[in-house]
Amino acid sequence: MDNPILTTLLNRRSVRRYQPDLPSDETIQAVVRAGQQAPFACQMYSVLLSRKKKAPYHAPLLFTICVDIYKLERFMALRGWKLVTNDLSLLFLAIQDAAYAAENMVIAAESLGLGSCFLGAAPYKARRIQKEYRLPQHVFPLVQLVMGYPAESFPPRPRYPLAFTLFEDEYPALTDDQVREAMAVMDEGYLAQGYYRKQNVKIVLEDDRQETFTFENYSWTEHISRKNGQWYASPDELLEQLKACGFSWEASDLPPA
Ligand SMILES: Cc1cc2nc3c(=O)[nH]c(=O)nc-3n(C[C@H](O)[C@H](O)[C@H](O)COP(=O)(O)O)c2cc1C
């Protein structure tokens, strides 16, 4: 199987070094327009752009893709409707609307010779982004996306084996060996690229745990285990950020029926 779209999809990589050249307005509009054409539940997202600030990885463009229920409320109001659907249900759909649009932007950019990289910290910086971009209530920064012309070249990153992802008819009883095999594909793939060594990234161990890894063996499954084994045990920080942006599903915060 081979066609230009599959080739673009299979060769996409997150780019972390950029040329300083600013993509044209026409290019930016083409990318966002392709994002808009993603499937949607209710178009519950907005895309913020910044070309003024120093973006991470010295990228010339910084997009902030926001979940946006505000525009839905606005047009419903013009039709004489009040939004009654709960925020959790709306958020499930709005995250999908925003994410599919964001990924369409990534692929459109790739097809135009641009590179990009998502930045996942936006939800934890929501209040700051809300102030900076003067967001109305019910708009929440889901993810940021830096973009520009790449200044680095390297092969695509590995993925789990297809058999560890695609399960037909029934979810299989995974053996430890199958899990280890999938881990090895990922770890060996990232090690072969010197992925963490090049970025000089190793998540620090907390609680007196002794560091035994070097960049010879620190790879993806250790990195992801350290993240999810140490960070954000409580949902409170994220819930606070959501609340500051007008999202809540706690009974005490809901308007009376
Ligand atoms: C939701 C999300 C958050 C991400 N956050 C970051 C980030 O904060 N910094 C970063 O350098 N890359 C980030 N990435 C990029 C991933 O690290 C990257 O997609 C993954 O390692 C696979 O590599 P590839 O995109 O080159 O195939 C993020 C990706 C996603 C989808």
Image: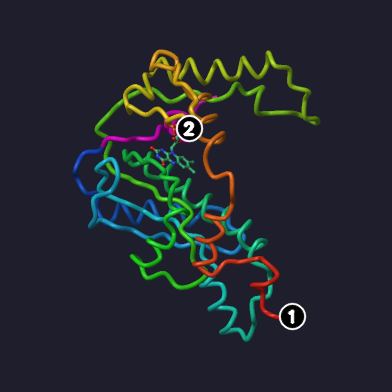
> Residue at image x 30%, y 44%?
56
Q: Which residue is mark 1?
A: 257
Give the residue drawn at x 32%, y 27%: 200
Residue 151 pos. (x, y %):
24, 33
Q: Are marks 1 and 2 in contact (CB under 8 Å)?
A: no
Nearer to me, 50 or 8? 50
Does the numbered disc 2 mark a residue whose Cβ is under 8 Å from ligand 1? no
Tag of residue 215: none
Residue at x-position 55% and y-position 36%: 228
Residue located at (64% from left, 82% from top): 81
Q: Is residue 2 magenta?
A: yes
- Density class for disc 1 (Cα within 10 Å; few <14, some 14-19, many ≥20) is few
Q: Which amino acid type is marked by label 1?
A: Ala
For this orientation, the residue located farthest to the right is: 170
Q: Nearer the viewer, residue 205 or 110?
A: 205
Q: Nearer the viewer, mark 1 or mark 2?
A: 2
Secondary structure, mark 1, is: loop
Task: Give how far apart the Cα atoms at labels 1 and 2 are.
Answer: 46 Å
Examine the image and state in which quarter residue 1 appears: top right
Look at mark 2 in the image and give the residue it sits on: 206
The residues colored magenta run: 1-17
Image height check: is 41 above or below 115?
below
Q: Position of residue 189 (x, y in %)?
A: 46, 18
Q: Earlier in the sequence, mark 1 or mark 2?
A: 2
Above or below, 50 against 106 in this view is below
